[in-house]
C-alpha cells in the first residue's frame, strides 16, 4: 500500500474560473504546508483531496484510496476545514460524539474517543457548552478535535492556527509534530509564512492555481539560481574579510553590516562559498557564525512569485 | 449485531431529530398541522354549546315540535303565536334596515321567538308585530361532519398542510445545511452518500409522519367530540368508522412519503424553495386535467383514490371545482399504495444520483 498522497495532473475549474491547474504532487508523510495568498488554490487542493469538490481533470489518490470512496477514505483522513460553522444547537461534546457515531462506533467507544479528542485540544471544561457560544479560538479547537477524534493517519487542516492565542498555538503545533512523528501525514495551509518555516518538513508553494515549487524549503531555495543567496557572516574583522572575498568569482556583492560586526554577502554558488569560508577560518579570521538569511518561505515565495504577494 | 449501514442511518436520524422536530424556523409547520384541529375543535365546542342551549329551552317551556310550527302562518300576530305555542323560552329583538329610495331607508322593528324540542331549534320571525317566516335549525349530524372532514382533509390538509409541511421539513434536510454551512461535516465521515440521503429522508419522514398523523388523529377526535358515545359507537362499528380512520391515517403517512421524496429531491436541485413549491403545486392541482399517463406522476392522484369518503358534488358547483372534487379515474387501494411508493422510490433513486455528484461550494449556494 502506498504511503503517499498523489495528485496526478489535477485541474479544477469553477465554470470559467481556475481553481488549480495541472497539479502533480507526491506528498510523503510528515508535516507539509500549502503556502500561498488568498485564491492561490490551497483550499481547493484540500477540498479536492477530501471529495468535497471533484476534479475537472486528473486523479487523486490518498494512500491508494480515491476521494469518492468515503466509507474507506474517512477512516484514514480527518479534515478540519476553514468553514467556521456548526450544526445548530450542539454542544462541543455532542458535536464530536454525534459524528463519531456515524463511523459505526458503539456509544461507549464514541464517548471515549470524543473525550480523548476534547482533552487533546484542552476544551474539557467547555465541552458541555454550545458551540455557538464559543470564542473564535475555541471554535477552531473543537473543529480540530472533531477532525482528529477518530485518530486519522492523514490530517488535513485548512488555516488551523487562525484565531489561536500564542500558548494554544504552540500546543497545537506540538500536537501536529506528535502526529508527524508517528508517521502520519499532516497537511496544513497557512499564509503566516514564518509559522510555516517553524512547522513544516516540506512546503508546497502555490500561486494563481499553480504549484510553483515543492519540497524542503532550503532545497527549493537552492534551486532559485537567478537570486544569489544572501548570507550573514558574524566576525571580528569584517573589512579584512570583505577584501578577502572581493576576489572570489562566486561572490556577487559584499556589504559591511550596519552594526559593523559582520558582512552581508550575496553568492551565486553557496556550496563553493561555504568551502571558502572553511579555508578563511583556518587562515586566522575569527568567524562567529555563517547563516543564510533568505532561505525562509517568505524570501523564497518573494523570489518565485513577487514581493507583493509574499507579504500576504 | 446491526449492519454498519443501519447503524449509520440511525446515527443520521439521531443528528437530524432535533433539527426536524424542534427547529425554531419549523414552528409554522406545527401551526399548519394544528389549524384543522383548531377548526374541528371550535366546531364541536360551538355545537356542544348550542345543544345545551336547545336542551335548556326545551326544559323551560312546553317542547315544541315541527308539527306545532307548521300551524304558524305568515301574518299571524305575536299574541296568536303565543296562544298556540306558549311563551317562548328565548327571544331576540331585531331591527332591519329596509331601503326606501336611493338614499333613504326605514328601520323595521322585529322579534325572533325561539322554541326547541330538545334537539332542534324552531324560530318564528316577526316584523312589525306580524309573522314573516318560520325556520328550524338542527345540530350537525355525524354524516354531515364526515363529509366536511373529507373536504377539509383533501383540500386543506393534504394539498396545503402536508404539502407545505413536507416542503419545510424535507427541503431543509440538505438545503438548510448548505445555508448553515454545516453539510460538509456529514460528507467528511465514512458514510456513503446514499446512506446519508436515506438517513436524512427517514429522519424527515419520521418528523412529518408524527406531526401530521397526530394532527389527523386529533382532528378526528375533535370532530367526534360533540357526539354521544352511542352515536360514536354506531359510526365506528356500523358505518365503517374504524376503517375510515385507518384510511385517513394511512393516507397521511403516504402523503408524507410522497411529498417528502419530492421535496428532498427539490432541496438537492433548487436553491430557492418557492420555485419547486409553485411548480409541484400547479402540477398537483392540474392533475385532473392531465392525460391518463401523466396523472400517474402525481402524488394527489394516488391519495385521492385512497380517501375513504367521497366529497359530494353539488350540482351548482363551478365546473373547475367539480373537476377537482371528482375522481374521474380512481384506482384500487393496492395500486394506489404501490403506485405512490413506486413513485417515491423512483424520485429517491434520482436524488441518490444527484447526491453522489454533490459538491460543497457554500459561496455559490
Image: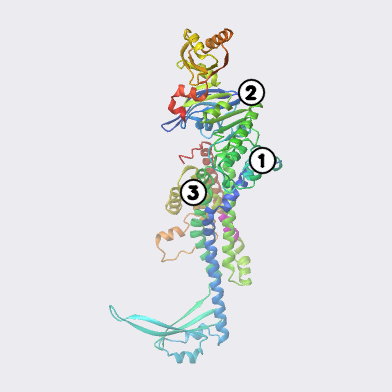
Q: Which residue is mark 2?
A: A1
How many residues crowd mark 2 within 10 Å: few (<14), some (14–19), many (20+)?
few
* Percent coordinates x, y for residue B127 in the rendering: 40, 85
Helix, strand, or loop for circle 2?
A: loop
Image position of B323 with respect to A28: above or below: below
Image position of B285 with respect to A294: above or below: below
How many residues crowd mark 3 within 10 Å: few (<14), some (14–19), many (20+)?
some
**Dot 3 and dot 2 within a common chain:** no
Please give the range of residues in magenta. Answer: B245-252
Q: Quadrant of residue A277?
A: top right
Q: Which residue is mark 3?
A: B296
* Percent coordinates x, y for residue A192 in the rendering: 52, 31
Q: Which is nearer the eye, A208 or B87?
A: A208
Q: Which is nearer the eye, B72 or A115?
A: A115
- Residue at 53% across, 74% down: B139
Helix, strand, or loop for circle 3?
A: loop
Disc number for residue B157: none
Q: Chain under label 2?
A: A
Amino acid at each position: 500500500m502506498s504511503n503517499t498522497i498523489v495528485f496526478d495532473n489535477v485541474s479544477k475549474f469553477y465554470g470559467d474560473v481556475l481553481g488549480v491547474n495541472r497539479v502533480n504532487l507526491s506528498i510523503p508523510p510528515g508535516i507539509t504546508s500549502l503556502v500561498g495568498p488568498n485564491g492561490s488554490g490551497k483550499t481547493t487542493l484540500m477540498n479536492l483531496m477530501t471529495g468535497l469538490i471533484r476534479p475537472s481533470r486528473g486523479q487523486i489518490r490518498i494512500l491508494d484510496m480515491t476521494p469518492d470512496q468515503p466509507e474507506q477514505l474517512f477512516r484514514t483522513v480527518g479534515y478540519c476545514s476553514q468553514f467556521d460553522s456548526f450544526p445548530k444547537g450542539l454542544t462541543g461534546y455532542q458535536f464530536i460524539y454525534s459524528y463519531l457515531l456515524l463511523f459505526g462506533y458503539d456509544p461507549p467507544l464514541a464517548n471515549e474517543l470524543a473525550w480523548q479528542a476534547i482533552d487533546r485540544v484542552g476544551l474539557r471544561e467547555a465541552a458541555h457548552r454550545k458551540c455557538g457560544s464559543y470564542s473564535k479560538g475555541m471554535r477552531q479547537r473543537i473543529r480540530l478535535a472533531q477532525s482528529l477524534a477518530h485518530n486519522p493517519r492523514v490530517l488535513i487542516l485548512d488555516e488551523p492556527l487562525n484565531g489561536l492565542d500564542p500558548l494554544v498555538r504552540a500546543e497545537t503545533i506540538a500536537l501536529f509534530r506528535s502526529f508527524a512523528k508517528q508517521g502520519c501525514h499532516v497537511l496544513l495551509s497557512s499564509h503566516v509564512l514564518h509559522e510555516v518555516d517553524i512547522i513544516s518538513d516540506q512546503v508546497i508553494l502555490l500561486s494563481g492555481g499553480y504549484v510553483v515549487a515543492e519540497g524542503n524549503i532550503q532545497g527549493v531555495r537552492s534551486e532559485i539560481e537567478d537570486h544569489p543567496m544572501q548570507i550573514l557572516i558574524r566576525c571580528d574583522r569584517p573589512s579584512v574579510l570583505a577584501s578577502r572575498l572581493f576576489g572570489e568569482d562566486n561572490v556577487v556583492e559584499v556589504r559591511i553590516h550596519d552594526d559593523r560586526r559582520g558582512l552581508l554577502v550575496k553568492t551565486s554558488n553557496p556550496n563553493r562559498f561555504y568551502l571558502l569560508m572553511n579555508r578563511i577560518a583556518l587562515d586566522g579570521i575569527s568567524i562567529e557564525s555563517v547563516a543564510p538569511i533568505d532561505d525562509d518561505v517568505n524570501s523564497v515565495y518573494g523570489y518565485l512569485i513577487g514581493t507583493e504577494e509574499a507579504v500576504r | 449485531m446491526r449492519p454498519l449501514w443501519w447503524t449509520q442511518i440511525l446515527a443520521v436520524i439521531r443528528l437530524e431529530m432535533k433539527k426536524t422536530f424542534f427547529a425554531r424556523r419549523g414552528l409554522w409547520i406545527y401551526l399548519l398541522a394544528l389549524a384543522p384541529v383548531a377548526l374541528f375543535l371550535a366546531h364541536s365546542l360551538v355545537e356542544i354549546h348550542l345543544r345545551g342551549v336547545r336542551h335548556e329551552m326545551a326544559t323551560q317551556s312546553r317542547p315544541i315540535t315541527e308539527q306545532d310550527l307548521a300551524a304558524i302562518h305568515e301574518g299571524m300576530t305575536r299574541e296568536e303565536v303565543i296562544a298556540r305555542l306558549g311563551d317562548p323560552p328565548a327571544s331576540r329583538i331585531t331591527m332591519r334596515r329596509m331601503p326606501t329610495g336611493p338614499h333613504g331607508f326605514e328601520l323595521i322593528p322585529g322579534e325572533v321567538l325561539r322554541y326547541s324540542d330538545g334537539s332542534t331549534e324552531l324560530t318564528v320571525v316577526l316584523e312589525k308585530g306580524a309573522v314573516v317566516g318560520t325556520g328550524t335549525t338542527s345540530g350537525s349530524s355525524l354524516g354531515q361532519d364526515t363529509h366536511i372532514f373529507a373536504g377539509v382533509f383533501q383540500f386543506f390538509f393534504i394539498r396545503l398542510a402536508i404539502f407545505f409541511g413536507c416542503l419545510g421539513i424535507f427541503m431543509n434536510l440538505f438545503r438548510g445545511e448548505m445555508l448553515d454551512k454545516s453539510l460538509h461535516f456529514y460528507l467528511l465521515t465514512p458514510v456513503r452518500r446514499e446512506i446519508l440521503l436515506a438517513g436524512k429522508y427517514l429522519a424527515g419522514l419520521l418528523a412529518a409522519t408524527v406531526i401530521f398523523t397526530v394532527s389527523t388523529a386529533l382532528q378526528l377526535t375533535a370532530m367526534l367530540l360533540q357526539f354521544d358515545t352511542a352515536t360514536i359507537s354506531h359510526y365506528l362499528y356500523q358505518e365503517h368508522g374504524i376503517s375510515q380512520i385507518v384510511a385517513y391515517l394511512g393516507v397521511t403517512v403516504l402523503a408524507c412519503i410522497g411529498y417528502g421524496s419530492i421535496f428532498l429531491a427539490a432541496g438537492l436541485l433548487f436553491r430557492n424553495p418557492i420555485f419547486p413549491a409553485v411548480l409541484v403545486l400547479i402540477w398537483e392541482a392540474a392533475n385532473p386535467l392531465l392525460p391518463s399517463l401523466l396523472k400517474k406522476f402525481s402524488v394527489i392522484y394516488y391519495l385521492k383514490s385512497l380517501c375513504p369518503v367521497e366529497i359530494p358534488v353539488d350540482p351548482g358547483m363551478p365546473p373547475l371545482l367539480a373537476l377537482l372534487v371528482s375522481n374521474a379515474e380512481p384506482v384500487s387501494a393496492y395500486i394506489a399504495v404501490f403506485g405512490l411508493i413506486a413513485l417515491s422510490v423512483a424520485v429517491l433513486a434520482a436524488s441518490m444520483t444527484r447526491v453522489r455528484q454533490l459538491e460543497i461550494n457554500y459561496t455559490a449556494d
